[in-house]
Image (tube, rainbow, N blue to C red):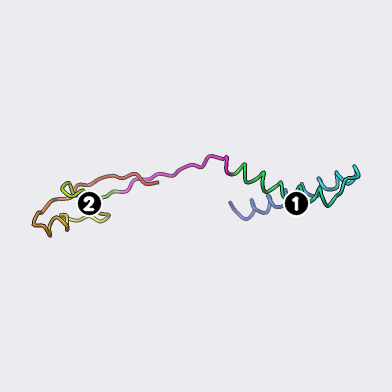
Amino acid sequence: MGRVDLFLIILYVLCALIFATFGKIRKRKSWIKIFLITLFLTPVTSSIILFRKKREKITYVVNRYKCPRCEFKYDTQLDHCPYCEKEGHIIALEEVSQIMT
């Protein structure tokens, strides 16, 4: 959300507060009570709307390298598995695509 969007939202909320307050003054209601109720209910309503909105998950694919013997995954491309090499086995790594969110 940009600065302009945030400014417009704040301006809209302030205008709504002012109109609601002055609208209730004409009907001889307590303007402070109406102002405070409007002031506190506006963020509650906004937060309910924001939390109910579905968020879009962004997924992307990362290439990893997996040892078929020990099934350990590496981010960098290696010729063989270092852990298996310590045990005396030289196993070539397989390229695996992993979906990330």
- The residue furthest left is 88
Q: Which residues are magenta?
A: 51-62
Q: Position of residue 26 (x, y in %)?
A: 90, 44
Instruction: Report how far apart the C-alphas of labels 2 and 1 lie in the structure.
Output: 57 Å
Query: Does 59 appear in magenta?
Result: yes
* Dot label at residue 72: 2
Query: Does 68 appear in magenta?
Result: no
**Mark 2 or mark 1: whose residue is earlier in sequence:** 1
Report how many numbered discs are placed on residues in the image: 2
For mark 2, give the secondary structure: loop
What residue is pinned by disc 1?
A: 14
- Residue visible at 14% across and 55% down? 84
For mark 1, give the secondary structure: helix
Residue type at mark 2 is Phe
Q: Position of residue 96 (x, y in %)?
A: 25, 45
* Dot label at residue 70: none
Badge 2: few (under 14), some or many (20 or more) residues near its Cα, within 10 Å? few
Residue type at mark 1 is Leu
